[in-house]
Image (cartoon, helix red, strand yellow):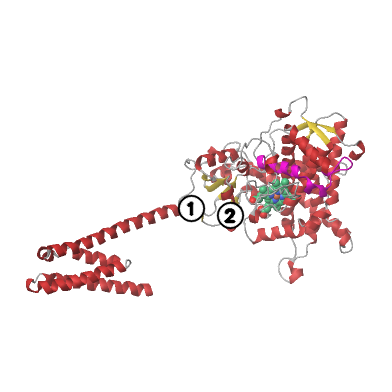
Amino acid sequence: MKDFERENNRSKRVHIDIQREENEKVVLCEENELSSEVKRKEKRDDHESKKERDNNTHGNICIKKSSLNKLIPKVVQTKYPIKQVHVDEKYKVLLCAYLVSKLVQSSIADKSKQNINRLPPGPKQWPIVGNLFQLGQLPHRDMASFCEKYGPLVYLRLGNVDAITTNDPEIIREILVQQDDVFASRPRTLAAVHLAYGCGDVALAPLGPKWKRMRRICMEHLLTTKRLESFKKHRADEAQNLVKDVWDKAQKGQIVNLREILGGFSMNNVTRMLLGKQYFGAESAGPQEAMEFMHVTHELFWLLGVIYLGDYLPLWRWIDPYGCEKKMRDVEKRIDDFHMRIIEEHRKKKDSKSNNIDDDDETEMDFVDVLLSLLGEDEEDGNGKQHMDDVEIKALIQDMIAAATDTSAVTNEWAMAEVIKHPHVLKKIQEELDIVVGWGRMVMESDLINLKYLRCVVRETFRMHPAGPFLIPHESIRDTNINGYYIPAKTRVFINTHGLGRNTKIWDNIDEFRPERHLPPNDDKENNINARVEISHGPDFKILPFSAGKRKCPGAPLGVKLVLMALARLFHCYDWSPPNGARPEDIETNEVYGMTMPKAKPLMAVAKPRLPAHLYH
Ligand code: HEM
């Protein structure tokens, strides 16, 4: 309303100005009244120009009209040339200043308009497919080279999807911390729809109340310190089984397939905790069930990792030349049958126990028992759902298996490969173990915090070989800006953890495996300052093993335990060397792309026991 009045007054005044100026012109033409009239005019001119100077905004129109008229009075010019020239110059200067300021203003406005919608730089795009076909077998390496060429934040058009990628700690912090509420969602990919119960899980669910509820259940009931403590004995058993497996092979002079035994160790730990079953080894669920389970989970991992063209090109989805979506539906069905069987078994077991679960029983509960026994919000506060339905339970079990098993197994295989490749690192690890643990017992979980050098080895492994080449893709929920660049809503975000660990702007000698680079600088033995070595991103975001922000890995404490325990036991109990007389430096370290990023070839090695024999049984 006020604006309207102001506008109205302004146009009235303009109208008056024009009339007054027109009268003036007539009056000015009367020679006899010239002198007094000119004086009056000069006075008014001064006043006008002051007013115009004082008031830039409403001056817009006044200046235009009055200045135009001021440029007209030719009579005054001829009669009083000197004075009038002075007046005209002043207005000319004003007009010029005004025009220049307008030009500058509009060019700034244009620029900022361009800036607001300026996408980050990136490679040239092809029609329809955009940059899709510029990504090869190792897309994390292709994207890292784009960052090298175009800068720390790169825009890609993948079919009909906007995407950004980065390998820069500051941009990563901006995305995961400063703008966490914008970027904490997930894209609805076909794999997520088919293989994660319609995105009804934790890891692949878009941001929203459903994800929040599932994540809360995960944090408050499954991955609590108390619950994890209750599985300590199972973990110790599995660590001993691992040592024993290698012992048996070493006694027979066999080469150890480290991928196989580390995979079994992770899988058994996870399935014992989740499902109450061991799938490999003495008390295993049975070879047929174990094989089926392994087979279907491997297919699941593969499908989850694939960059499926149908997610980016609707036409491709329609044709589906390799039957990928059909495969997803097939795996979905087999996995669902498997989970359903597990839930039924647990229900039967629960029903057969007549009374309520007391505290002692609670320590024996696996995750499925816990989820089945959760009291619904209905029973706690009189509203909400009764308890988790079967689909939610299946989605959560599925997530845990997928998120926990492969990540820790892949990390362990890489760490073993790099250590066997670098015998001086193995020697230093063993020196530390001999001091902290000694030769008279096995490593226990309580030792892990004191194995600083080994922790640096794990950090260095995460730098060079993060469990996944990217974090699970994030997606923006609304338009935003990063570093002055426009990022549209629904942009897919590929945070390149592999590229971060090999970013030459933050790491030197990137291809050198050197755990010492992670030793804390303020570690001072003489003054007994004993800094801890954390296996997390830390304040500098130079490694990102478990991510940060809302989507950070809720299983990190367990993941760290599984990794450190397996490595500590294997290095404490055995000396390791490559098989068949190969040299350590011959161990290849090529990776294959997937949701996790394993070594291209399984790691094979020879183990030689180094502790007293009785400790191995
Ligand atoms: C060495 C072992 C592990 C590593 C390196 C690891 C790493 C990660 C990473 C990088 C993410 C993605 C975060 C993001 O997208 O920003 C993630 C997510 C997740 N991890 Fe882990 N993880 C490990 C073990 C585990 C374990 C043991 C569990 C549970 C038992 C677990 C459960 C999850 C879940 C549920 C998510 C999804 C979180 C969400 O989207 O809200 N992880 N993990």
Compared to residue 41, the image places residue 338 above or below, namely above
Question: Magenta part mainly helix, strand or loop?
Answer: helix
Q: Is residue 199 left or right of residue 491?
A: right
| Figure check: 45 above or below 360 | below
- Residue 204 screen position, x and y as percent: 65, 52
Label 1 or label 2, whichever lies nearer to me, is: 1
Residues marked 1 and 2 touching at CB (< 8 Å): no
Per the image, the residue denoted by label 1 is 484
Q: CA distance from mark 1 to mark 2?
A: 16 Å
x and y percentages locating residue 373 in the rendered image: 80, 61
* Residue 413 found in image quarter: top right
Q: Is residue 232 visible?
A: yes
Snapshot quadrant of residue 578: top right
Decide which of tag 1 and tag 2 comes sooner along the chain: 2
Screen quadrant of the N terminus: bottom left
Check the image and name the residue furthest to the right.
614
Looking at this view, name the residue that lies furthest to the front: 526
**Which residue is at a point 65% across and 46% down the rendered structure image?**
543
